[in-house]
Amino acid sequence: MTQGWNGAPVRPQGTQKRHLGRREVLHSLLGGAALAVSSGCGSRLVVGEGTGTPATSIQRFTSEGGGSRDGTSWQHAMAVDRLESALASAGPGSNYMIGFDPHSLAPVTWKRTLVHLRNSGEAGKPIAVTAGYLDAGGNVAAAPQDAPFFFRGLNNWTPALAVSRDAPRGAMIFSGDVSHVVLSGFRVEGAGFDGFVKFGTTRTSLDNFEDIAIRNIVAHNVGRVIESTKAAKLKNISIENCEVRGAVRGFARFWNISDSTLRNLVLDADHIDGGKGNPCQLIAVFSGSNVTFENVTLKNAVNSAGVGYTEGDGIVCERGTSNFVIRGCHASGMGDGGFDAKTTDLTIEGSTAEDCKYGARIWSQSNNVVRRCAFKSRASSLPSDSGCMQVGGRATVTDTTLEVAPGTCAFHLPQLKDGNPPHVQMIGGSIHLADGARLLVGEGKALLELKGVSVNGVTKDGTFTK
């Protein structure tokens, strides 16, 4: 048995021996007292005092609230539309629990922002906002994978609506300089391009966010889940154990993020095509340093971008980034790159890519390292149009396996406008070239060095040019 953020025991998902009936849950919450549920179109309210946590340390919320609506107990829970005003007095260690009855759940809907988070906790004492099913102990617990969604954008959500001006705004916005906050347990459907969670309010507001954790978010059919403004700076951000299925623009976009980790994510764009001008980049970062992506699965981002050209990427890191690590990540079914980075000093290790236009694309003239990876290209009619790796800068590739499909190449080394020749050194590992595949497609003074590399079973050492 593990512990939740408030120290209460939470049974790992999928381990319950049986579901408690509604009356059993209510009886446990009330200690045998009389039962009451709210009426209306929102989630039915389960009433009663939680056990094991002092009432003064928690404020409780349901869709519609009930009783005196002061948040001191589930019988007197606040309505979710009071969450923003309640958070105005949040401080270190404040806990806000949003509970849903697992037996009668109607989601909270939103079009405009529900909550602006403006307050900060302290290191070791974060402000915690948690959504989940009410359990028999009066706490909120993770819902199973097939549970209904807790929060929903417009009911008529479509990919076109998700990128339009009529799309729902970010539901939860971090405003001003905010630090030491944990969000967890949210189940979301139908967010727009503004995301469900957003950092920053305007393009020019210089907001700083530090020590923010986002955990256990499940989202389906979204424009984005996490968005930030161009002026927002994020530091020491942790995003963990999240799942997305169906995304128009992607899971998250950061204009500036440093010293952060994204891990244990399953991100499936589900082939939703936002059309030209709306490329899907499952994770996009424009600037920042020292960010690690670990155990991230990226799938099926494919977008039309004109005749004969497709877009859609897994992890995209632009030229303002440095010292990024992609570890144990897996990309498949991308219209463009699985891992596409202009990062200075990039490391990709223990990762795989298949059925992408290119498994990895590396662009900077810096210390870029690819080690213990496996890339498999998809068949193409043009060898320069698809392959295992595309390198316009420099990279050292060690102990890596490349499976090269017909009509594709192991390495495509394009000449960039900066005039610096692309250069790849591959040490160890293996390359398997199918019939009709090429080892190298190069431009300018492109250079490929092989040292102890098995090519179709024959160890090769040498230098190759276009």
Image: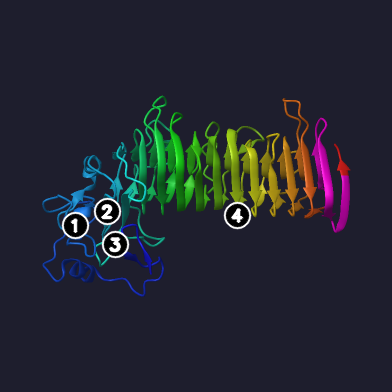
Residue 97: numbered disc? 2
Q: Amino acid at mark 2?
A: Met
Viewer-proximal residue among 14 and 303:
14
Q: Amino acid at mark 4?
A: Gly
What is the spatial separation of the Cα atoms under label 1 and label 2, in whole angstroms?
A: 12 Å
Residue 102: numbered disc? 3
Asked if the residue at tag 3 contacts the one at tag 2, i.e. Cβ–Cβ closer than 8 Å, the answer is no
Q: Amino acid at mark 3?
A: Pro
Viewer-proximal residue among 392 and 38:
392
Q: Which residue is mark 4?
A: 328
The colour scheme of the drawn protein is rainbow
What is the spatial separation of the Cα atoms under label 2 and label 4, in whole angstroms?
A: 33 Å
Residue 55: numbered disc? 1
State left or right for residue 365 relative to residue 207: right
State left or right for residue 386 relative to residue 182: right
Q: Main secondary structure of the magenta part?
A: strand
Q: In the rendered image, which quarter is residue 76 located in?
A: bottom left
Asked if the residue at tag 3 contacts the one at tag 4, i.e. Cβ–Cβ closer than 8 Å, the answer is no
Q: Amino acid at mark 1?
A: Ala
Q: Residue at x 23, y 50 (%)?
A: 63
Queried whether the magenta region covers residue 143, the answer comes back as no
- Which residues, given as a range, are shown in magenta? 435-462
Queried whether the magenta region covers residue 446, the answer comes back as yes
Quadrant of the rendering where the C terminus is positioned: top right
